[in-house]
Amino acid sequence: MAKFFSETMALVLFFVAASVVFRSIPSSAELTSLDHSPKNGRSLSALVIGDWGRRGEYNQSQVATQMGRIGEKLDIDFVISTGDNFYENGLTGLEDNNFEESFSNVYTAKSLQKPWYSVLGNHDYRGDVLAQLSPVLQKMDSRFICMRSFILNAEIADFFFVDTNPFVEKYWTDPEDNTYDWRNVAPRQIYMSKLMKDLDDALKKSTATWKIVVGHHTMRSVSEHGDTPELLQFILPILKANGVDLYVNGHDHCLEHISSNDSPIQYLTSGGGSKAWRGVYRPNSDTLRFFHDGQGFMSLQLTKSEAAIAFYDVFGHVLYKWTMAKFGEEAHPAM
């Protein structure tokens, strides 16, 4: 334990030093800010989907059909993608037809012709990341908005999209993961330090009623991948210190709601966009409220006083609903 503590402190001190020493060096971790005005200014509605891009296979098309139906019913403002947008190995380049076959030709419902705000997943990093980040894709399909890390200001809520991939150490050290495209990311320590500082600063400046962080990797999960230790060590303290309400992710191919036992944070996994049914359940120390080891997606509805989530299965059936009320500066689960 003493060794772990000393190593952790050494790394933290390195990050602090790096943020000072390299402050003048441009970094792609800097958070770009986008604005999205809700349709009526008083409420916001979105769908959340992750781990989907399989050319319609593994029930991706069936999930997309139900997303279209629910999207119309809720009159959604936009869609959030939690990453792993294109399997198995991201895009090979701008000419890769996987973009159209896994995105444009699958999510064709009228209600889904809204912006798709997306982060990168680990499978996306196994391809040409710069192609997936290229504005050329937006010319091909204007819905697709993908950046490493950025802020979406939506009046009622601020969404902080975070590139969690560089934090996972094994992607850098495991020989099986040597195909990751780390252009504009390496060196890892400098990138992480800058991103952590930018996220902390942005969260502190936010005056939105709801603060929601979106990343690909799990923070807390009872499924195959489980918790991501690096996020618990480096990102979670920033979220706790800045009053974040929701952490939304994919990575585990399931649907989950876990409540933190020592903070108001709710952990929401929506990674059931295609291939699922892992058959793994590993409980952790926080409070598990809902777990579905299968395909589906999530809806999120926000007003200044309430946040409501719902999980849907591949048939569009509501599996679970939960609400949180906001009183002043505090959020409370609605029983």
Image (cartoon, rainbow, N blue to C red):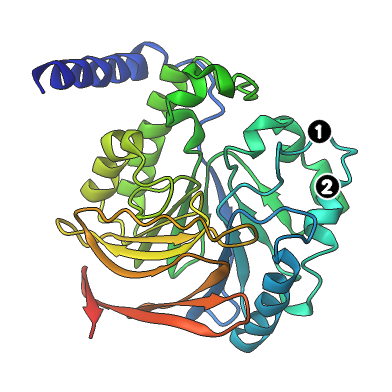
Q: Is residue 185 above or below residue 71?
A: above
Q: Can residue 42 be seen in this view?
A: no
Q: What element carries label 2?
A: helix
Viewer-closest of 41 and 189: 189
* Residue on which disc 2 sits: 98
Q: Extreme front residue here? A: 279
* Whole-percent x, y for residue 14 in the image: 29, 14
Residue at left offset 79%, top offset 78%:
110
* Residue on which disc 1 sits: 92
Q: Residues within 10 Å of mark 2 (few under 14, many from 20)?
A: many
Residue at left offset 43%, top offset 49%:
224
* Whole-percent x, y for residue 208 in the image: 37, 63
Residue 328 occupies quadrant: bottom left
* Whole-percent x, y for residue 1 in the image: 11, 23
Viewer-closest of 316 and 298: 316
Q: Is residue 152 visible?
A: yes
Viewer-closest of 247 and 135: 247
Q: Extreme bottom residue here? A: 73
Q: Is residue 156 above or below residue 215?
A: below
Residue at left offset 47%, top offset 17%:
173
The amino acid sitting under disc 2 is Asn
Residue 230 occupies quadrant: top left
Residue at left offset 24%, top offset 41%:
237
Total number of numbered discs in the rendering: 2
* Whole-percent x, y for residue 277 in the image: 54, 61
Mark closer to the chain start, 1 or 2: 1
The amino acid sitting under disc 1 is Thr
Q: Are marks 1 and 2 in contact (CB under 8 Å)?
A: yes
Give the Cα distance between marks 1 and 2: 9 Å
Q: Is residue 179 above or below residue 94?
A: above
